[in-house]
């Protein structure tokens, strides 16, 4: 079997020629029904005009004349809505069959409402209408048989949709290339801003006595992390304690502490007096509820661990961390008013903004790279399907030549040297 190598444009011409040859008998037979339907619609419109003319007769009953005119106007409206396809395809013929069915149902639905209320003067027009409607019903049945006989043609027509989709997928190269170029320009600008802000911050640290100021944040994060770990065992029991009315009462300070310590433990323990009495008050209420079986945790081990943890906290397990937290807070207050601290805060803020901006544009570039890979997968999928379906439908083998595809753009989606490590380095600053 000889294999043809075709571009998408050549494939579209090749396909249309083969489809026209395969469907010529279908088109020839469907064309007769299309013409019959057009003629029937015109005849039905002429019936509507006849009804309007009879209604205008001086001898007509006023009520019957009004009904005839309304029915005629409804016929005109339904005919105008009928869409007769100009191109004969299997899909359009399916639509034509559905359109005929809708037309018949809608017109006779209106007729059932008005025909019986007309006088004998309109009897001839109604008989004509009935003849043309029967013709339409015959064509609907004829089209149904034709569609059944040529049902295989539907699969052939679907190939054209796949070819069209493949063409659209390959046309996206210019758009992607332009987007990538613009993003790389933004990355270069963001990288320059990042380098400038990093150099400013590094220089400031070298010439100023800011080491202790900068170490406070990392020390605070360390204490915050340890506090969360210490309280983690009690997180679920406390949540359940709030969700159920155990009957164990706890004062406002204890309730607030149970909330604050699980939202921001560093801030909560810093604000508490030594020995964190509010937290102990809230936890002792929790302990009472557990001991009295007023709060079931569905796991005895969890209950024992919660009680043990509460006892440890009551015996001063967080005392050293509280002292450290208060010390950090005190030193922060001392440095807060200094020019060094303010300048360090300003430079760090500018550096973080530059880092986020660079990271944003870099991720945007990586996102486009992922999108292109998905697009390439789709192109491969559609290409394989089309080649396989053409072989099955026409017993000919075709290889689709896609020309220059999107692969070269993937290299442009690799961030410039040094940019990929920016987010990691910025988190260490």
Image (tube, rainbow, N blue to C red):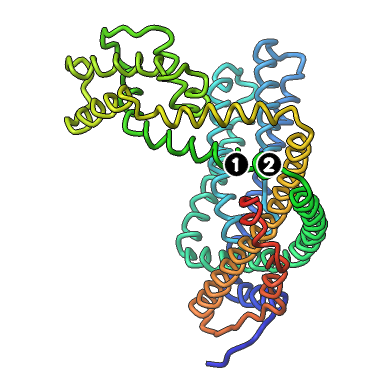
Q: Earlier in the sequence, mark 2 or mark 1?
A: 2
Q: Is residue 157 above or below residue 112?
A: below
Most foreground residue, 20 or 367: 367
Q: CA distance from mark 2 to mark 1?
A: 7 Å
Element type at mark 1: helix
Q: Which residue is mark 2?
A: 43
**Picture residue at 69% right of the left edge, 72% below the top:** 411
**Picture residue at 68% right of the left edge, 34% below the top:** 47
Q: Can residue 231 be seen by looking at this rendering?
A: yes
Q: Which residue is mark 1?
A: 132
Q: Residues within 10 Å of mark 1 (few under 14, many from 20)?
A: some
Most foreground residue, 271 or 228: 271
Element type at mark 2: helix
Most foreground residue, 236 or 135: 236
Residue 354 percent coordinates (x, y):
75, 48
Q: Please state if 283 lies on the left or on the right of 307 as rendered.
A: right
Query: Marks 1 and 2: in contact by CB < 8 Å?
Result: yes
Q: Is residue 37 above or below residue 412?
A: above
**Picture residue at 52% right of the left edge, 55% below the top:** 143
Residue 148 percent coordinates (x, y):
45, 60
**Picture residue at 70% right of the left edge, 65% below the top:** 418
Residue that lies at the very extreme toward the front in this rendered image: 209
Q: Please state if 235 lies on the left or on the right of 260 as rendered.
A: left
Q: Please state if 288 lies on the left or on the right of 333 as rendered.
A: left
Q: How many marks?
A: 2
Residue 227, label in figure? none
């Amino acid at each position: 079997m000889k294999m043809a190598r075709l571009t998408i444009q050549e494939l579209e011409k090749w396909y249309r020629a083969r489809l026209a040859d395969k469907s010529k008998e279908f088109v020839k037979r469907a064309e007769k029904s299309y013409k019959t339907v057009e003629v029937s619609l015109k005849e039905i419109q002429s019936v509507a005009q006849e009804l309007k003319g009879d209604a205008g007769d001086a001898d007509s009953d006023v009520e019957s004349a009004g009904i005839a005119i309304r029915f005629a106007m409804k016929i005109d409206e339904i005919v105008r809505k009928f869409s007769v396809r100009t191109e004969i395809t299997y899909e359009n013929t399916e639509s034509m069959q559905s359109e005929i069915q809708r037309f018949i149902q809608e017109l006779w639905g209106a007729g059932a409402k008005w025909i019986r209320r007309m006088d004998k003067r309109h009897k001839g027009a109604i008989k004509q209408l009935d003849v043309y409607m029967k013709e339409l019903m015959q064509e609907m049945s004829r089209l149904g048989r034709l569609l059944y006989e040529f049902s295989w043609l539907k699969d052939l027509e679907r190939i054209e949709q796949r070819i069209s989709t493949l063409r659209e997928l390959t046309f996206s190269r210019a758009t992607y290339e332009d987007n990538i170029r613009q993003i790389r320009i933004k990355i270069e600008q963001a990288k320059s801003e990042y380098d400038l802000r990093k150099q400013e911050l590094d220089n400031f640290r070298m010439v100023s006595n800011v080491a202790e100021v900068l170490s406070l944040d990392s020390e605070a994060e360390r204490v915050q992390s340890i506090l969360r770990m210490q309280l983690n065992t009690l997180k679920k029991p406390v949540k359940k304690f709030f969700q159920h009315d155990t009957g164990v009462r706890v004062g406002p300070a204890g309730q607030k502490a149970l909330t604050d310590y699980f939202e921001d433990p560093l801030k909560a323990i810093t604000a508490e007096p030594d020995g964190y009495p509010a937290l102990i008050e809230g936890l002792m209420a929790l302990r009472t509820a557990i001991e009295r079986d007023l709060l079931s945790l569905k796991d005895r081990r969890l209950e024992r661990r919660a009680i043990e943890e509460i006892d440890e906290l009551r015996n001063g397990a967080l005392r050293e961390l509280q002292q450290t937290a208060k010390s950090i807070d005190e030193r922060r207050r001392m440095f807060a008013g200094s020019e060094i601290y303010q300048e360090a805060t300003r430079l760090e803020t500018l550096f973080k903004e530059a880092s986020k901006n660079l990271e944003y544009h870099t991720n945007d570039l990586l996102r486009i790279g992922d999108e292109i890979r998905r697009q390439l997968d789709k192109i491969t999928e559609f290409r394989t399907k089309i080649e396989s379906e053409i072989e099955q439908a026409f017993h000919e083998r075709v290889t689709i030549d896609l020309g220059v595809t999107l692969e070269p753009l993937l290299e442009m989606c690799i961030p410039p040297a040094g940019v990929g490590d920016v987010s990691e380095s910025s988190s260490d600053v």
